[in-house]
Every structure is written in structure tokens, then in C-alpha cells.
Amino acid sequence: MHKADEEILRTFFRLDEARRQRLRLERLLTPEVFNWTKRGAPPRQSWSTLIKLEELANLGLDRAALEDWREVERKAKADLEQLARDHPLATYWEPIKGLGWYLLGCFIAAAGDIERAPTVSSFWKGMGLDIVDGKAPRNTRGRRGAAQQERPRAAMPHVTLVGEQIRSQFLRAGGRLDAFYRRFKEEAVGKWPEGPKMRWHKHGLRVTQKLLYACLWKCYREAYGLPAPAPYAFEILQHRSEPIRIQHFYEDGPEWF
């Protein structure tokens, strides 16, 4: 793994753990910060809660510890954003509307060692966007929990979380990301006119995300001097005459459709 990627991954995990500890202590020590307007005042603390708070204080987990974790989280996020700005992928990421430096750091952390993804298909698999028997893994009626997971090995939890954060920006950012999403959603409506709206929505998000990841994977590999062959769908099947490029996601870039 390249040194820049390793530093980002370490910082991401430090930020993730600081956020977990901060949220845990906030729920225990400062319940009044949550919005209780619809339910009245915060619930009265039970004896069990009071005893737990006393024992946590004896272990050093008090309001001072909460402030310490807040500071660790703030510093880690600032470090992650700075490392992302200095990363070779930043040049290609910055012009994409709606995806800031924090998300770039998260994306690089989720990608891991880019040398271990020699093809875009392997990269998609590592990022939780692979297919099983030609279809995207999805929930099945009547199956719960782990039984819902059709893929042999699921993506790491932090990878899945980063993917959700990036997808949410497709709808908030507007611009090209939203245009891609809406175009593919319309295609889903035409392909499955009787299908549920959620299927159209998820199809638009998934295809947009896979195309964006394919472009970023190519830029990422080439930035490190690694080969980045065209995806099978473009190189062999020739689904479109013009392969998609990262510039198609820029507001001032060429149109792909």
C-alpha cells in the first residue's frame, strides 16, 4: 500500500473510533442535547443509569473524556481532509460537484490498496458493488438478517458506510451526479414499468455509483503509474461508442448521454 493511502486509512479509522466513542458518551452524559420537543422533557434517569454514570466516572469516562473525544474527532477529520487534498486523486475529484475533501478521504480509505484491484470489476467487488449470478445482491421476501446476503463475502462495514455517504450526495448535490441518477432511473422505469419505485431509485443510484467508481479507479491507478484496462462492457462488448471518462462528471465537462 502506498504511504499516502496508508496515512489516510489510519486517520479514517482514528476518526471513526473517535466518533463512536463521542456518540456513546454523549448519549450517556448529555441526554438533554437531543430533541425532546415532541415527547416533552428528557426521561428521568433511573437508578441503574445513575450507578452506571458513577462507575464510568470512576473509570475516567466523564464529561472531560467526552470533550477529549470531541477534540480527537475534530482533529482527525481535519487531518483526513488535508491528506485528501494532497492525494494524487484530488485533481480528478475536486471538480465533481457535491463531493468534498472529507468524502475523498473516506473513498480512499474504503478503496484500500489500489494495487490489489487490477480491473474495475475487482474494484467494484471490493467496494461492495459486485454482482451475483448476473444480478445485484438484494433482499428477498421472507428472509432476514444474514440470510438476506447473497454474496459469499460482504464488503467491510466501513466500505458500505462510505458508499451510502457518497450515494446520498447524488441527490443533494444536483448537477451532473443528479443528472446521471435521473437518467438511469428513467431507464429503469422503461425497463420495469410495473416495478416498485424503490427499484427504479436504487437502480439509478447503483449505476451512477458504478460508473463514477470506474472513472475514479482508472484515475487512481494511472496516478500511481499502474495499468488501468477499460471495463469489459466498453472494451469487449462495446456498449457505447464513447467510454465514460471522469470529465463527464464535471459541470463544465462534455456530455456523455
Image (cartoon, rainbow, N blue to C red):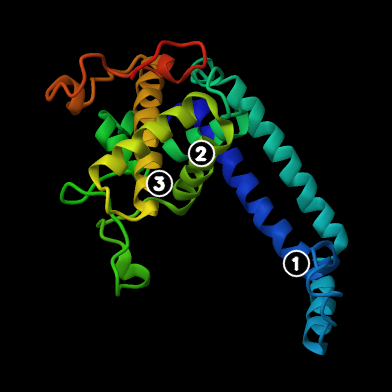
Q: Is residue 136 above or below residue 74?
A: below
User: Looking at the rendered structure, which numbered label has been put on residue 201?
Assistant: 3
* Residue depth check, mark 2 versus mark 1: number of the one nearer the observer: 2
Residue 32 position in % (x across, y down): 85, 67
Element carrying mark 1: helix
Element carrying mark 3: helix
Q: Are marks 3 and 2 in contact (CB under 8 Å)?
A: no
Closer to us: 13 or 179: 179
Gap in Å between the C-alphas at discs 2 and 1?
27 Å
Query: For the point 35% across and 37% down, which residue is it?
Result: 186
Residue 1 position in % (x across, y down): 42, 31
Task: Answer with left or right where residue 94 lies relative to residue 190.
Answer: right
* Residue depth check, mark 1 versus mark 3: number of the one nearer the observer: 3
Task: Answer with left or right where residue 84 lies relative to residue 134.
Answer: right
Label 3 or label 2, whichever comes before in sequence order: 2
Query: For the point 40% across and 46% down, which residue is it?
Result: 201
Query: For the point 46% across and 40% down, which residue is it?
Result: 110
User: Looking at the rendered structure, which numbered label has been put on residue 27?
Assistant: 1
Element carrying mark 2: helix
Q: Amino acid at mark 3?
A: His
